[in-house]
Structures are given as C-alpha cells and as structure tokens.
Image (tube, helix red, strand yellow):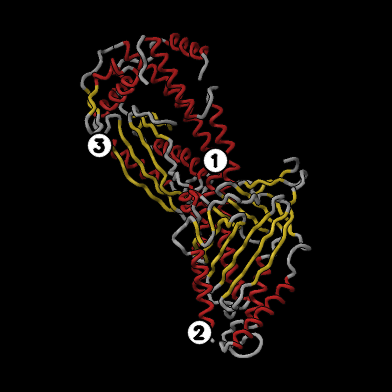
C-alpha cells in the first residue's frame, strides 16, 4: 500500500512540479503571461450561493469516485477489496478525506472579491483571506517562492489560473473564468493532498456589483490610519 | 517655455542690481567651500520584475531620494568648515564640492548609500558605501530623530577629514576653478583658456583673469542669481522633507517591524510541531494558515506603501508647483531658469551662450 501511495504522490508531485518548478518562465504547464483572450476580471464581485456548488453534493461525488477507484484497484489486484482504503497512515481514510473537504470549503468560503487588473498586474482581494496576486512583467510568469510555499499564476486562454504548492503535500489551484458579458465570475478551487488519491473541487459563482455612490470611500494613510469619507466617487 | 516679459523683467533686475560681487581673488580667498548635494539616485531598477523581487516601492524611493540629501545637508551644516550647503535638483558640475548619492538599500532595517564626493578640480574625495542598521526600538525616539543618523554623520566626518587635509591655498584654487568652470560653461570661447582638462577629468588652472575683469564680474553675478534660485529650491526640499518626515518615519518603523516579525515567524514555524496527523484538517489548516499569514503580512507592507503614497504624493506634487510660476517639474524649472541666465548673459555680452 505504501508503494501505491508513493506512486500516486509522485504522479501528483511531478504534475505540479512540471507546472510550478520549470525554468521556462514564459510558459509553464499551459500557463502564459499573455493571452489574446485574457478576460477582464476587474471590479467588485459577491458570492451567488444559489449558483455555486453545494459542498455536500461535491463530497458525495468525491466519496463515490474514491470508492469506484478503490474497487477498480481491488479488481485489478492492486489493493484490498471493498470501499475506501483505510490504513494506519491515514491514506484515503475518513479523516484525510474530511480534512481535504473542510480545507477546500474553508479556502472557497470568500463571499466578496475585489479585483484590480492592469496589463501586467492583477490583485484579487478576498474577504478573510490573503490576496491572490499575479505579475507579468516582461511578458514572463513570476513564481513567488517563500519558506511557506510557492505561488505561480498565468493565463490559460481566457482563464486566469493561480497555483499554490505548500509544504506537506498540499497543492491548491484557483481558476477564474468570466463570460463575455462580465456579469458573472466563476472561481473554481481545487485542493490536492498527498493523503487522498483524488483532488477535491468546489465551484463558486460570483455576481458583479457596483459599490453604491453613497458608500464609504476609504484611503489608507500612515499617520492617520484608514481615512474614510462618504460621497460620490 | 517662459514668456518674453518675464525675461525682460529679469534683465531689468540685473541692470538695476549692477555690480554686486567683487573680483575673483577676493571671492576665492573665502576659507570655506560651498557644497552641492545632488538629489540622490533612488536606485530603482528599470526592470519592474526586479523591483517587485527586491521589495522596492518606487514612489517611496523617489521621496527618499529627496529626503536623504536634506538630512545630510542638516548634518553638514551642524559641522563647522563648510560654506553654503545646498540640495541641487540637477547636476551642477561647477559646484565647489559636489556630493552625489545612490540609494542601494533602504527598508527600515538597513540603509546603504553609495556616496561620491568630487571637488571642482575633479579630485574625488569620497567614493564609498555607507551602511547602517536599525531595530524597531531605534524608532522610539522623537519624530524628528533619524535612526540612521550615524550613516549621515559618518559621511560628514569623512568629508570633513578630507576637507581638513586641504591647505588654504588649495581651497582657494578649488573655488577659483569652480568659478572658471561655471564661466567656461557660459562662455567657453572666453574662459576655456584659463583651465586645462586632464585625461582623468581633473582641472588645473592655467592662469587667472585680470583683476576686475568685467566679464568675470558678470559671471559672478549670474552665479549668485543661480544660487538664489537654488536656495529657493533648497527651501522647497527642506519643506518637503519636513512634511513627509512623520509618514516616512512611520513607514520605516512599520517596515522594520514587519521584517522582524517575518524573521520570528519563520523561526517559529520551522521549530513548531504539526497540530495533527498528516492529511487531517488540523494539519492542513495549519499549513494553509501559515502561508496565508505570511502573505497577509507581505501584503500589509504593500498597503502601508500605498498609505505612504496617499499621504506624500500631494506634497510631492506641491513642491513642483510652488517654485516660481514656470511650468513643469522642479527639475524642468531649474533647467528653464538656467536658460534664462544664459540668455541674460548673451544679452549683456553679445556672446552666444553655450548649450
């Protein structure tokens, strides 16, 4: 079983490393710094709960697929018979699957997005989370490396893709898509861990909204802190 | 462009002023050298990716490039041994002593400045990197105290030491060369012959103009007028420096605190144990939150930089608009002012001013 786990982890790891660790900054695993079809995501977006995935339904799909995968392996003689595989190391066990689902749900919980976009820089401000940022200076993809993980983003045709590779076998991918009318934005969050053989994906749909003219308008200052005023923008 | 009436007005002022300055010899006998501090090179890489990688915020660097020469000017003025110390918007290579600087690093924790000091004769007094470091505790003093004041004091001490090695005769020669270089820039066909330029860029006096040379007296008057403009500009830099000081000090303090926090955070993360079994929500959440927090802190610095820009940019724009009623930036205005002086010189002498 450890061999099987290692095999899947290596496949997963290689797929992410090919995407994130390549020396070719202009194009990495289908991601590009420029796209003729690059969408404009700029603006304010609020979560549409009705149009977004129901997490429980997605969990049901995941569990069903894991069972089918386990059965296929069992039938081919690659694993023990019956349901999900449970072993001492926790691979594909209930705790690991639950951990994967809860983390994905936590990451995808953002109800409000504020996106600033220019030709060479994109910042996605997420409520209660860190910003997702993307830089394309000199038409190159920029990979951000920190002691706590690495971050890469780029265009895949009209989609904007963010990939995070974190320690402990954790990988996260966000894919942003919008239609021609730019009234809706779909944020697809996929999380993969080395303890579950399949990734878990949640789709969130956001609707564009315009902050009201009478809303507060705040500006950061150093000596006075955040200064807010009301009135037309 | 400036209007013809403005030029006529300035010409009239010159005619009314008449002879103001004495001959070259009297001027050169003054014991102290004037110092010109050129606004520093902010050291901003042209490559935007490099700026991002090095954590350089361009607007802050541009402000620092104006702020730091004013701090150095204040330190130099506190020491005896110097004449006028002025912050220059543009290179004035006929300065008696010209000090230029480049910001190599400035992040609240470290300050690193490349300083070059060269006298009018082309002799290099200093060409060195000055560095200093500060901790968040160093920011607890008065709002006007600079945690890196030692860096500026070291530069001032080295300049003073170099100055003290000069005799009175050499000091006088440097002043004479400075004036003749200024004169030569205005009327090379008249004044070029007084100076020889060596291969290494050093100037030597060949001979001196006659005592009471009317052409040189005009030059002296023109230079005094240029100094008056620079003094006005210098005042604007001081005002700018005073205006941004509180925000700039806070920026550096926060920046230093952030750097210390990140170091501590990294150390704590490296030694701490995982909260749960691999794959469990507790373990995954810990990994994700660690990354999330590190990014939030890095992004806080971006937010603070924006706060600095929001506060300082109006002041920055203001200094460009308050000096005289010429158009463009302070640097443009200085260039226009120098053009006016050259035209006045041409009107008075009938000579074609050099560009």
Regarding mark 1 in the picture, which secondary structure is present there?
helix
Q: Residue at x 53, y 47 (%)?
A: B249
Residue B330, which numbered label?
none
Residue B165, which numbered label?
3
Regarding mark 3 in the picture, which secondary structure is present there?
loop
Residue labelled with disc 2: A3
> Mark 3 to mark 2: distance in Å?
77 Å
Query: Is B352 left or right of B299, judged from the image as shown?
Result: left
Q: Nearer the viewer, residue A44 or B222?
A: A44
Q: Quadrant of residue A55?
A: bottom right
Q: Nearer the viewer, mark 1 or mark 3?
A: 1
Residue labelled with disc 1: B244
Q: Nearer the viewer, residue B305 or B285?
A: B285
Give the image location of residue A59, x and y in percent. 70, 75
Which chain is disc 3 placed on?
A: B
Q: Residue at x 25, y 36 (%)?
A: B165
Q: Are marks 1 and 2 in contact (CB under 8 Å)?
A: no
Q: Would residue B348 be seen by someone viewing this image from the given angle? A: yes
Give the image location of residue B65, x and y in percent. 46, 40
* Residues beneath discs 1 and 2 located on the same chain: no
Give the image location of residue B263, x and y in percent. 49, 63
What quarter of the picture does the C terminus of chain B occupy? top left
> Mark 1 to mark 3: distance in Å?
37 Å
Which chain is disc 2 placed on?
A: A
Give the image location of residue A223, x and y in percent. 61, 46
Question: Looking at the image, is mark 1 or mark 3 earlier in the sequence?
Answer: 3
Q: Residue furthest front?
A: A76
Circle 2 Cα neighbour tier, 10 Å, few/some/many (<14 / 14–19 / ≥20):
few
User: In the picture shown, does residue B29 fall above or below B218?
Assistant: below
Regarding mark 2 in the picture, which secondary structure is present there?
helix
Q: Would residue B140 be seen by someone viewing this image from the given angle? A: no
Which chain is disc 1 placed on?
A: B
């Amino acid at each position: 079983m450890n061999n099987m786990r290692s095999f899947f982890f290596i496949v997963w790891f290689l797929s992410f490393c090919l995407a994130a660790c390549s020396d070719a900054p202009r194009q990495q695993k289908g991601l590009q710094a420029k796209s003729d079809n690059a969408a404009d995501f700029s603006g304010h977006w609020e979560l549409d709960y009705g149009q977004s995935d129901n997490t429980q339904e997605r969990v049901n799909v995941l569990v069903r697929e894991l069972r089918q995968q386990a059965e296929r392996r069992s039938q081919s003689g690659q694993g023990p018979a019956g349901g999900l595989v449970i072993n001492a190391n926790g691979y594909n066990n209930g705790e690991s699957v639950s951990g994967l689902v809860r983390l994905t749900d936590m990451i995808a919980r953002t109800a409000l997005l504020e996106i600033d976009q220019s030709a060479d820089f994109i910042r996605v401000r997420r409520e209660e989370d860190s910003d997702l940022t993307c830089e394309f200076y000199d038409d190159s993809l920029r990979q951000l490396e920190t002691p706590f993980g690495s971050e890469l983003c780029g265009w895949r045709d009209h989609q904007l893709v963010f990939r995070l590779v974190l320690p402990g076998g954790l990988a996260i991918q966000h894919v942003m898509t919008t239609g021609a009318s730019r009234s809706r934005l779909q944020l697809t969050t996929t999380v993969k861990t080395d303890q579950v053989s399949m990734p878990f994906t949640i789709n969130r749909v956001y609707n564009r909204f315009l902050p009201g003219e009478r809303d507060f308008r705040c500006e950061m200052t150093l000596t006075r802190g955040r200064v807010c005023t009301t009135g037309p923008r | 462009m400036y209007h013809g009436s403005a030029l006529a007005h300035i010409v009239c002022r010159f005619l009314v002023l008449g002879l103001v300055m004495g001959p070259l010899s009297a001027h050169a006998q003054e014991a102290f050298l004037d110092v010109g501090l050129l606004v520093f090179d902010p050291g901003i890489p042209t490559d935007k990716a490099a700026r991002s990688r090095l954590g350089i915020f361009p607007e802050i660097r541009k402000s620092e490039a104006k702020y730091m020469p004013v701090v150095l000017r204040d330190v130099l003025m506190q020491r005896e041994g110097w004449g006028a110390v002025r912050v220059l918007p543009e290179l004035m290579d006929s300065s008696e002593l010209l000090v230029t600087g480049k910001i190599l690093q400035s992040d609240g924790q470290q300050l690193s400045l490349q300083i070059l000091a060269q006298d009018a004769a082309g002799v290099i007094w200093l060409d060195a990197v000055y560095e200093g470091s500060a901790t968040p505790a160093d920011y607890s003093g008065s709002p006007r105290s600079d945690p890196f004041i030692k860096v500026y004091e070291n530069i001032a001490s080295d300049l003073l030491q170099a100055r003290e090695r000069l005799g009175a005769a050499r000091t006088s020669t440097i002043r004479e060369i400075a004036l003749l270089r200024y004169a030569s820039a205005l009327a090379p066909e008249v004044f070029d012959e007084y100076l020889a330029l060596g291969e290494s860029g050093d100037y030597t006096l060949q001979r001196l103009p006659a005592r009471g040379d009317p052409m040189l007296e005009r030059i002296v008057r023109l230079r005094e007028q240029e100094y008056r403009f620079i003094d006005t500009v210098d005042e604007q830099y001081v005002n700018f420096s005073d205006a941004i000081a509180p925000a700039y000090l806070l920026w550096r303090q926060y920046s230093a605190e952030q750097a210390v926090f990140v170091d501590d955070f990294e150390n704590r993360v490296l030694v701490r144990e995982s909260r749960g079994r691999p794959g469990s929500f507790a373990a995954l959440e810990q990994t994700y939150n660690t990354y999330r927090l590190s990014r939030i802190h890095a992004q806080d610095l971006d937010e603070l930089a924006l706060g600095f820009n929001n506060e300082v940019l109006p002041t920055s724009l203001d200094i460009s608009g308050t000096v005289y009623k010429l158009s463009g930036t302070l640097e443009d205005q200085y260039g226009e002012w120098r053009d006016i002086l050259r035209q006045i010189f041409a009107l008075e002498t009938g000579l074609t001013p050099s560009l």
